[in-house]
Image (cartoon, rainbow, N blue to C red):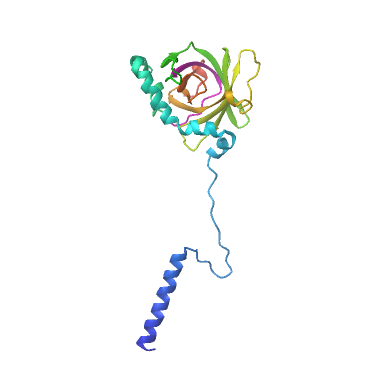
Amino acid sequence: MSRLGTSILATVALVAALSACETGKPRVLPGGVPTIEVGPPAKSEAWKAVATGEDRGRIERLSLAWQDALVDAQKSNAADVRREGKLLVPGSALPRPAPTPGSYNCRLIKLGKATPAAKPYETFKPFFCYIEVEGDLLTIVKQTGSQRPAGRLWEDDNPRRLVFLGSLALASEDQPLAYGDDPKRNMAGVLERIGPFRWRLVIPWPQSTSKLDVFELTPVDFASQPQ
């Protein structure tokens, strides 16, 4: 074969190779079937399919809620904020957030002023809440008080938190409403572990007078907790 013929064949081969690269199509052997690998669905898809658009937005703006609420609280109660330690530190979540089912001591701290007349920092008397298993999910129920949050905990793509979707039961009601039955009572937030036998439930932009509600949870019976 002449040099010219060899050069033409080389050029054709090069063009063919470049064309294959440009199309990005996988090469399939004769008789073969191309396959597409699809990864597992994101864990967050489950809770996002249940949550309202407003509550998805609240959770997405969690870091902003922390920022705004702490700015308000530190202006008047800086010593109180410091005294709480990791409970009021935004980035203090630890791995393995799922709590053990059982009874817990709970208390609430409200941060930030959502209304002009609200207090920038407010604490409430401790109460009891209960964590139990319902199907494949954990649930949290406040057992006492005139306003009792209750809801389910969902796995999230962030391995350091569970997503809480619930509602608020009032004093005269035996059972809490299901999430979504009354949008004005919906609650959404995240549950995080912040230390040995210590969790927090954080509700950003609650439908109340605060910018951030932080519930601290510690077991009533430490002996029942895994070591």
The residue shown at (50%, 66%) is 27
Picture layout, residue 29 above or below residue 199:
below
Q: Which residue is the extreme one toward the bottom?
A: 2
Q: Is residue 165 visible?
A: yes
Task: Name, please, the residue furthest toward the top.
Answer: 125
> x%, y% of residue 63?
41, 30
In the image, 153 versus 181, the foreground residue is 181
Image location of residue 10, percent across then percent down: 39, 79
Across and down, in percent, residue 37 comes to: 53, 54
- Disc tally is 0
Return the residue found at the far right: 174
In magenta, the rendered stretch is 94-110
Res 93 seen here:
no
Q: Position of residue 106 (x, y in %)?
A: 50, 16
Q: Residue furthest front?
A: 116
Determine if the magenta segment contains residue 60: no
Looking at the rendered image, the quarter that the N terminus falls into is: bottom left
Residue occupying image coordinates x 45% and y 23% = 212
Q: Is residue 101 magenta?
A: yes
Tell me which residue sits at (43%, 19%) in the image.
Answer: 113
Q: Residue at the spot x=53%, y=68% of the render?
A: 29
